[in-house]
Image: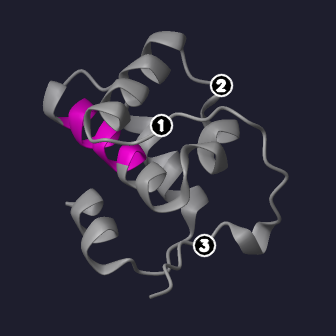
Amino acid sequence: MIAAIIEKYHVSIEVDDLIDFGKKYLEDRNSEVRSAAVNVIAKLSKEMGYENIYEDLKSLKPQLIKLIEDKIESEGGTIIKVEVNKSKSFKNISKKN
């Protein structure tokens, strides 16, 4: 649901909160919950670019990062691993038309 909102409405949201939400549930026992968490991270990547959220994901287990990257690539996204020095004000999703 959250992933769909991000993609459909391109709303301005505090990205740290969404990343923390996704990371929290990536290791949930329920596969549907884990899948939803992967979708949230993948949609954030689509909106912001993977390079802009990569730094926040580096603390995850390698297999979880691979799962996220596989999802991003399966949806036509690109995986670019660079560290971006971003200010707190940058961490808002705001898509311009």
86 displayed left or right of 78: right
Q: Residue at x 47, y 49 (%)?
A: 45
Between 60 and 43, the residue placed more toward the observer is 43
- Indicate the colouring scheme: one colour
Q: Residue at x 72, y 70 (%)?
A: 90
| Whole-number angstrom distance, CA of label 3 to CA of label 1 | 18 Å
Q: Which residue is mark 1?
A: 23
Label 3–label 2 contact, CB within 8 A: no
**The N terminus lies in quadrant:** bottom left
Quarter-wise, where is residue 31 in the image?
top left
Q: Single out the residue that lies furthest toward the bottom.
A: 97
Query: What is the span of residues highlighted in magenta in the rendered image?
Result: 33-42
Tag 1, which secondary structure? helix
* On screen, residue 69 above or below 61: below
| Whole-number angstrom distance, CA of label 2 to CA of label 1 | 10 Å
Q: Which mark is residue 92?
A: 3
| Amino acid found under the numbered disc labelled 1 | Lys
Tag 2, which secondary structure? loop
Q: Earlier in the sequence, mark 3 or mark 1?
A: 1
Is residue 27 something one can see in this rendering?
Answer: no
Mark 3 or mark 1, which is nearer to you? 3
Callout 1: 10 Å neighbours few (<14), some, many (20+)?
many
**The C terminus lies in quadrant:** bottom left
Residue 1 is a magenta residue: no
| Amino acid found under the numbered disc labelled 2 | Ser
